[in-house]
Amino acid sequence: MKTSHDGRYLVKSLVHASRVLGVFQSAGDVLRLRDVVTRTGFTKGMCFRLLYTLHQCGFLDKVGENQYRLASEVRRRRLCRIGYAAQGQETSFDREVRASLVRAAEREHLELIVVDNRYQPKIALRSADYLIREQVDLVIEFQTDEVIAGAIAAKYLEANIPFIAIDIPHPGATYFGANNYQAGLMAGQHLGRWAKKNWGGECDEVLLIELHRAGSLPGARMRGVVAGIQASIRVAEPRQTVTLDGDGQFQTALERVRKHLRESRAKRVLVGAANDSSALGALRAFQEAGRDRDCAVVGQNAELEARAELRVPDTRLIASVGYFPEKYGDGLIRLALDILAQKAVPPAVFTTHQVITPRNVDHFYPNDSLLPASA
């Protein structure tokens, strides 16, 4: 059974021409040369030549100086089928990545087949089998467990299906997502500067809420946190650093930090968490113990729930490093189309990071108040 297109036999000029035809929304849609450049991402010269050729071949009508429309209702065939295996953790980060992918795929007239990994390795393996049976042309994989990354990669490689891995590296995949060490370093530097300003540079304990199942590379976030703190203040003894596995989930982090606080009497605790769910769970544990003044917490992702907490007066969630998942879709689809067109792509594409704080959260996310209260 044929599972994917063999790129060796693709005529790239026809692929490019079909991309140009695909940016016209209807037969009456009139586009200028610059509109086509913007929508395709091709160079101005390439777009001019393609438009000229399509006009000469009768696919486009010229209706003005460098303005074109479809000559007739051209039935646009979808160029490819893209599979998306969603992480399925039911966080706002997950929802934003999925929504942005749907928007980007619709804009490019691509068929997006979405399956949900449900944050479970066995289901992630079944999702890979399903996408292969669906004969997708490329897969965007978002699953957290490093232990099955090799097995999932082997399935796609055997089926000759290229794939992109979000945030968790997979063998043979193009990586898209966090620059983990840099994001952790930014978090640690912010914690250290905060401690220097508010605690005179003193720190009794560094508490790291890790995500062990994600493996070594996402674990670089925590190494970055420690390095960032040490760049600002002196953490004298290794025993001052405590690591807990929050599993990337609010409830797990809450329970494990709650247990830790029964044994620890540290008064100045800097908390670095692998994601916002863990950060908020840790913060809740300190609040329950009546010790929230003893901590300062920085999360990762700047998710909606964390942004709401940043707006709470005197919160001890002092920051979250933003990844802007609402922009993931555009970057992922551009990368997918480049791979399918057999363009040279880098082995890793890193997203932009920004420290989101109570002072700048409204600048970066001014429309949060417009979202439904249930969000």
Image (spheres, rainbow, N blue to C red):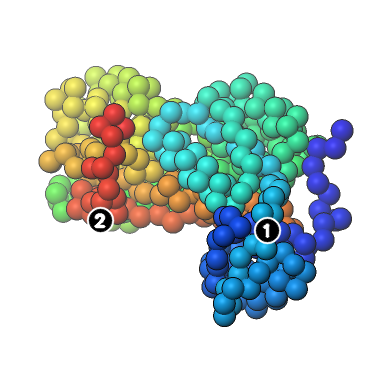
Please state, as top left, top right, bottom left or bottom right, where the C terminus lies in the image: top left
Q: Secondary structure beneath disc 1?
A: loop
Q: Is residue 204 left or right of residue 214?
A: left
Q: Where is residue 255 in the image (x, y as percent from the top left)?
A: 32, 19
Residue at the (68%, 42%) spot, across then down: 81
Camera-near label (2 vs 1) is 1
Q: In this view, does 234 lie to the left or right of 138?
A: left
Could you tell me residue 298's position as x and y percent? 30, 43
Q: Quote the CA–CA distance across marks 2 and 1.
A: 45 Å
Inspect this view and state whether residue 282 appears.
no
Residue at horizontal 56 percent and vertical 37 percent from the top: 142
Question: Would you say the residues marked 2 and 1 are in contact, meaning their CB atoms lie under 8 Å apart?
Answer: no
> Where residue 209 appears, x then y in whole percent?
37, 33
Q: Which residue reaches farthest bottom?
A: 65
Q: Quadrant of residue 13?
A: bottom right
Label 2 secondary element: helix
* Residue shown at the point (40%, 54%) measured from the top left: 353
Instruction: Please name the residue that numbered disc 1 is placed on.
Output: 72
Give the residue pinned by disc 2: 363
